[in-house]
Image (cartoon, rainbow, N blue to C red):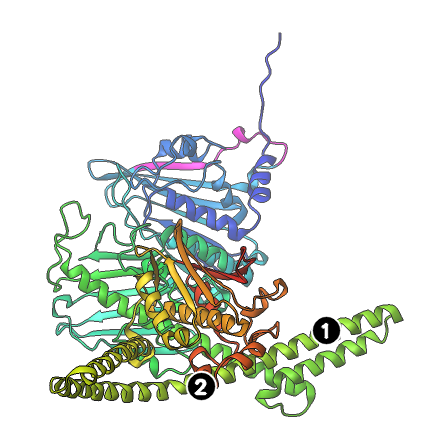
């Protein structure tokens, strides 16, 4: 029996080098990945013009290099299993980026001639240096790969350091387009984002960086990681000088360069510095799309996002590692914290379009902030543990956290400002384009109606060429769409007008609150006088004065309850934070606000179904009262309008992480077709039952206690609950009830 063996034709190299590696840019990325796998910390890449022979590509790394044996057994062998059997790099334990053993044929894709110089440690402080010359043009189809030789040599040297250099010549000029070069930068930036980490059983990885030189593209990048950090929306720097003064500088898209000095000094943080890239995954917020794209940035953030701490140049763990939220960024986002700190609120108040109470809505996840906080030699109180897993004592970390969060929150404030600027500029651009199309100026208030007019005109012109049935269908659809747009715009304008009026009453409310407090002080004096007078009287007159004094005390308590609620929307309420609250006492307080009405109209409000132990939140106390007062006001108006038996039943229970509360009443009820409509702004009485009944049964002087029907109440409640992860809806009521309102709260 004859024995047969497989042979390999040189044509295979063309298949590997040119078919699997699609372009010169991808080929070059593969070579840099090889350097990463070889535990390099830096790679220099050069794409140098060499007319007329074509560009020269040079890749130099400071990795572990290769011995002559490695070159012979692994590098010169096609599809070796070396990376499959050695999945982690030897020194730093990096997961290897390649496994097929064909990456070296990227060299062939880049040019026909290769000069390889590599050095690896050989003991006694010496290196074994190997050089190989490869002429890929020798590997012609029809020839056996193993019969073609490459010139090589090796020697032991004392003045070399480990690493590898590849010099590739004779590439095609037309391979290097600007678009392809930008793709290369983005792919290399993903590798340069590696800032290092500890892996068990290996030396600590110091990270990986890249320099890039490309004269044909007028570019020299000495530090690709630094370029990466400045490619996102903004770059934030923080420096604390010897006197403890902390200076923050933000250089960001649309706002340029901004500086702020922390109002207090941090002497123990002297020599602390930080550089942080702010990296939202949004193309419109990228300053340098040649270096990052949405896809590459997601990969960068997933693997290397976070703010690290370095102490005198060395990384201190676990700060910035996945799951370590040392700056409490993800915690505050989870709690839906939106208000800036007391220190930053005055700054935010000066920025048009920025609400100090909601500016932190622009706070990104902790992974979207990439950078290092460097604790220098003059900082006090920072003593790393022997394992470098944290510091001995956490006092100074708290101060450091406060300062870095101040800088990050300040940047979030400006990002909110930048977004407001962009929205305004976009609106102006759109209006100018519309004016250009119409050939006349358009008032800002008439933009929507003018745009609708243009849309109608264009569609009608296009529809004239359609058959009659289709034209009629298009015109009907056009009418429906334009009416919807116009009505929605009118509704928004009316809602804004109402909200402006509501906002304008806050000053009057505070003045009223102040005057009522003065009245309560006078009532206290009157009560004291009545007590003194009662002591001089006897019989029925003394008893009558006792009754009057009791009424004074009761009215005073009701006024105090009301004043405590008005304080929730005062200027001081800006300091309020979302909290957990016991529901029952707040509900009792809300019910007491309507005591005059419920007594006058004999309304029974049963709240025994609300346990005293149930807590709701986190949410603002003002938000909870807004929910309770609005739904109680609606229920009270409904039972008054209906006449007859006037009952309201309140019940609440816990269901998992939510609290479900029901408000049932015997009022006028609500048709199912209006279950959702009543939560739309200004839908005060879609069934036309409520205010028709109130008109005949409610005393005019009482209408201001239960509300005059702006149609905003349930809309506001729905927005509050939705924002806090809850909901509100009407359900089909049970027997004996006309309405059942379900409220889901956190």
Q: Secondary structure at mark 1?
A: helix
Q: Position of residue 715 (x, y in %)?
A: 50, 71
Of 238 and 525, nearer the camera is 525
Q: Residues within 10 Å of mark 2 (few under 14, many from 20)?
A: few
Of 656 and 141, nearer the camera is 656
Q: Secondary structure at mark 2?
A: helix
Q: Residues within 10 Å of mark 1 (few under 14, many from 20)?
A: few
Task: Give the residue at x 25% y 41%.
Answer: 203
Q: Nearer the viewer, mark 1 or mark 2?
A: 2
Task: Give the residue at x 24% y 83%.
Answer: 548
Residue stretch rendered in magenta on the structure: 141-155
Task: Give the residue at x 39% y 63%.
Answer: 364
- The disc placed on residue 522 is none
- The disc placed on residue 480 is 1
Q: Which residue is mark 2?
A: 701
Of 289 and 626, nearer the camera is 626
Assess whether residue 154 is covered by the magenta stretch.
yes
Q: Which quarter of the figure is the C terminus placed in?
A: bottom left
Q: Is 612 located above or below residue 525 in the figure?
A: above
Q: Is residue 534 left or right of residue 608?
A: left
Residue 410 seen anywhere in this rendered image of the structure: yes
For the residues bearing labels 1 and 2, Cβ distance under 8 angstroms: no
């Amino acid at each position: 029996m004859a024995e047969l063996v497989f042979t390999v034709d040189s044509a295979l190299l063309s298949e590997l080098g040119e078919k699997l590696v699609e372009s010169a840019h991808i080929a070059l990325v593969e070579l840099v990945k090889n350097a990463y796998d070889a535990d390099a910390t830096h790679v220099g890449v050069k794409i140098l013009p060499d007319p007329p022979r074509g560009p020269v590509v040079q890749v130099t790394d400071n990795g572990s290099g290769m011995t002559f044996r490695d070159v012979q057994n692994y590098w010169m062998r096609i599809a070796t299993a070396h990376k499959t059997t050695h999945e982690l790099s030897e020194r730093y334990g990096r997961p290897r980026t390649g496994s097929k053993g064909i990456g070296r044929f990227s060299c062939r894709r880049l040019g026909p001639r290769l000069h390889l110089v590599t050095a690896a440690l050989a003991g006694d402080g010496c290196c074994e240096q190997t050089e190989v010359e490869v002429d890929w043009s020798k590997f012609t189809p029809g020839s056996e790969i193993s019969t073609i030789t490459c010139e090589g040599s090796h020697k032991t040297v004392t003045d070399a350091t480990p690493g590898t250099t590849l010099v590739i010549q004779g590439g095609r000029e037309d391979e290097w387009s600007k678009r392809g070069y930008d793709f290369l930068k983005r792919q290399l930036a993903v590798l340069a984002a590696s800032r290092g980490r500890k892996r068990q059983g290996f030396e600590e990885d110091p990270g990986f960086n890249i320099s890039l030189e490309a004269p044909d593209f007028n570019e020299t990048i000495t530090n690709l990681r630094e370029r990466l950090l400045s490619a996102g929306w903004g770059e934030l720097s923080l420096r604390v000088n010897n006197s403890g003064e902390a200076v923050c500088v933000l250089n960001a898209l649309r706002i340029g360069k901004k500086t702020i000095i922390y109002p207090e000094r941090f002497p123990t943080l002297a020599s602390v510095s930080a550089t942080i890239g702010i990296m939202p995954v949004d193309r419109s917020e990228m300053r340098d799309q040649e270096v990052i794209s949405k896809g590459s940035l997601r990969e960068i953030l997933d693997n290397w996002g976070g703010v690290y701490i370095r102490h005198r140049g060395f990384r201190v763990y676990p700060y910035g590692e996945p799951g370590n939220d040392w700056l409490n960024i993800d915690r505050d986002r989870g709690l839906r914290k939106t208000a800036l700190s007391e220190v930053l609120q005055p700054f935010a108040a000066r920025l048009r379009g920025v609400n100090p109470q909601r500016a932190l809505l622009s706070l990104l996840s902790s992974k979207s902030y990439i950078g290092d906080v460097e604790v220098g030699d003059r900082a006090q109180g920072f003593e790393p543990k022997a394992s470098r897993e944290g510091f001995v004592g956490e006092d100074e970390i708290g101060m450091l956290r406060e300062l870095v969060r101040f800088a990050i929150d300040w940047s979030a404030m400006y990002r909110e400002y930048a977004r407001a600027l962009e929205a305004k500029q976009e609106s102006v651009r759109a209006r100018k384009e519309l004016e250009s199309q119409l050939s006349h100026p358009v008032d800002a208030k008439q933009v929507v109606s003018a745009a609708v007019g243009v849309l109608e005109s264009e569609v009608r012109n296009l529809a004239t060429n359609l058959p009659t049935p289709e034209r009629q269908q298009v015109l009907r659809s056009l009418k429906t769409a334009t009416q919807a747009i116009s009505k929605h715009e009118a509704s928004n304008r009316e809602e804004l007008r109402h909200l402006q009026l509501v906002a304008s009453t806050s000053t009057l409310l505070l003045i009223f609150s102040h005057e009522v407090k003065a009245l309560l002080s006078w009532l206290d004096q009157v009560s004291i006088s009545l007590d003194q007078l009662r002591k001089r009287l006897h019989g029925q007159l003394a008893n009558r004065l006792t009754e009057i004094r009791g009424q004074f005390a009761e009215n005073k308590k009701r006024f105090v309850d009301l004043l405590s609620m008005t304080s929730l929307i005062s200027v001081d309420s800006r300091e309020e934070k979302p909290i957990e609250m016991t529901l029952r006492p707040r509900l009792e307080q809300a019910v007491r606000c309507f005591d005059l009405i419920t007594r006058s109209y004999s309304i029974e409000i049963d709240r025994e179904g609300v346990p005293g132990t149930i807590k709701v939140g986190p949410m603002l106390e003002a938000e909870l009262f807004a929910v309770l007062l609005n739904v109680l006001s609606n229920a009270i108006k409904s039972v008054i309008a209906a006449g007859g038996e006037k009952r309201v039943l309140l019940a609440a229970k816990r269901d998992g992480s939510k609290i479900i509360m029901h408000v049932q009443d015997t009022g006028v009820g609500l048709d199912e077709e209006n279950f959702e409509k009543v939560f739309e702004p200004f839908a005060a009485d879609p069934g036309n039952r409520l205010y028709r009944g109130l008109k005949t049964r409610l005393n005019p002087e009482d209408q201001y206690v239960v509300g005059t029907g702006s149609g905003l109440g349930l809309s506001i409640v729905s927005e509050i609950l939705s924002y806090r992860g809850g909901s509100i809806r009407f359900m089909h009521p049970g027997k004996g009830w006309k309405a059942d309102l379900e409220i889901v709260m956190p």
